[in-house]
């Protein structure tokens, strides 16, 4: 199926990570052009523009959005993917202040600064007028959250708090962005445990796979491709042109109770 993403311009943060790399591959496979933002360079190609940016810096994000618009003419899709998850489990009263502040800076403020810079770029360019989808062929913002924001995660209170806060951001931004682009949409993808370098060490621990899949009817952890497929759905003006303010959980049917 043609998702309507050919020649669309997608800005992806955290593009050098496990999910980020797959997002870049998935969008380019659909014919999109990608501005790949990260703190480590990613390979360039005819479709991929690597840009170094730290999501903690509004100035760096604004420069990156301007560079993407200069290279590709505009921006259409923003995937707010950059995030960190400290692997050591610590109760709230034992969390170092520096760790809490860093997670908040990257996962929450970084998400806000990214969306802010994207909307500013969209305001400068205006809505697309050459779309093939007609009414509803607008911009799309997709935040990458986590099941921790829905169910909580013991030992990672700061991480869970940042991911839960994204829901409020999504529900607010969906009402604001339409004043810039009347058909723009804002949605959230909540992955559960996913096989990425960030989670690999934890998942490799004895008995960890059994433990993390006990609440899933589909007893396996996700791949980055599973997450990317959900993001493509929300990015597509064909598949989800009338979907905004929604959260899609990619976690094998995870519940807040043990099933196995």
Image (cartoon, helix red, strand yellow):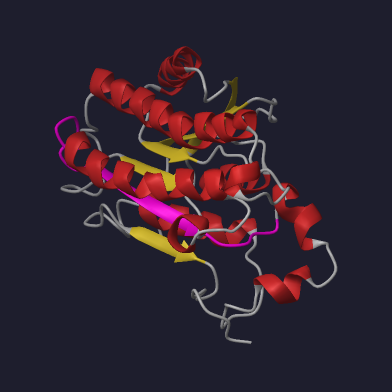
| Residue 136 horizontal/vertical position (percent) | 19, 48
Residue at 37% x, 31% y is 115
Q: Is residue 241 above or below residue 222?
A: above
Image side of residue 212 versus residue 8, left or right:
right
Residues shaded magenta: 178-195
Residue at 57% x, 35% y is 100
**Residue 4 appearing in the image:** no
| Residue 204 horizontal/vertical position (percent) | 82, 62
Q: Nearer the viewer, residue 172 or 234?
A: 172
| Residue 84 horizontal/vertical position (percent) | 62, 40
| SS majority, magenta | loop
In this view, which residue lies farthest toward the front? 93
Q: Nearer the viewer, residue 110 or 51?
A: 110
Q: Is residue 226 above or below residue 7?
A: below
Q: Is residue 145 above or below residue 10?
A: below
Q: Is residue 246 magenta?
A: no
Residue at 57% x, 78% y is 216
Residue at 22% x, 25% y is 126
Image side of residue 32 versus residue 97, left or right:
left
Q: Where's the C terminus, which quadrant?
A: bottom right
Q: Is residue 181 magenta?
A: yes
In this view, which residue lies farthest toward the bottom? 260
| Residue 239 horizontal/vertical position (percent) | 32, 60
Image side of residue 52 versus residue 147, left or right:
right
How many numbered marks does the figure carry? 0
Q: Nearer the viewer, residue 145 or 101?
A: 101
**Residue 224 appearing in the image:** yes
Residue 95 sits in quarter: top right
In this view, which residue lies farthest toward the right? 206
Q: Where's the N terminus, which quadrant?
A: bottom left
Q: Nearer the viewer, residue 105 or 192?
A: 105
């Amino acid at each position: 199926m043609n998702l309507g993403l050919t020649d669309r311009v997608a800005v992806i943060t955290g593009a050098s990570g496990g999910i980020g790399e797959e997002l870049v591959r998935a969008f380019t496979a659909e014919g999109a052009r990608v501005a790949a933002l990260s703190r480590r360079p990613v390979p360039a190609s005819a479709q991929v523009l690597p840009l170094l940016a730290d999501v903690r810096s509004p100035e760096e994000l604004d420069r990156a959005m301007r560079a993407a618009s200069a290279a590709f003419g505009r921006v259409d899709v923003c995937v707010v993917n950059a995030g960190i998850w400290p692997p050591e489990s610590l109760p709230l009263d034992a969390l170092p202040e520096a760790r809490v502040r860093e997670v908040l800076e990257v996962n929450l403020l970084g998400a806000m600064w990214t969306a802010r810079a994207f909307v500013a770029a969209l305001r400068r360019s205006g809505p697309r007028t050459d779309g093939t989808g007609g009414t509803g062929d607008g911009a799309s913002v997709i935040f990458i959250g986590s099941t921790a924001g829905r169910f909580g995660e013991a030992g990672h209170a700061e991480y869970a708090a940042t991911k839960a806060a994204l829901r409020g951001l999504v529900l607010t931004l969906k009402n604001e962005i339409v004043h810039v682009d009347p058909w723009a949409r804002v949605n959230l993808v909540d992955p559960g445990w996913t096989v990425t370098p960030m989670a690999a060490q934890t998942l490799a621990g004895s008995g960890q796979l059994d433990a993390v899949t006990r609440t899933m009817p589909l007893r396996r952890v996700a791949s980055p491709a599973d997450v990317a497929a959900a993001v493509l759905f929300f990015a597509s003006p064909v598949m989800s042109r009338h979907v905004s303010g929604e959260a899609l959980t990619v976690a094998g049917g995870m519940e807040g109770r043990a099933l196995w």
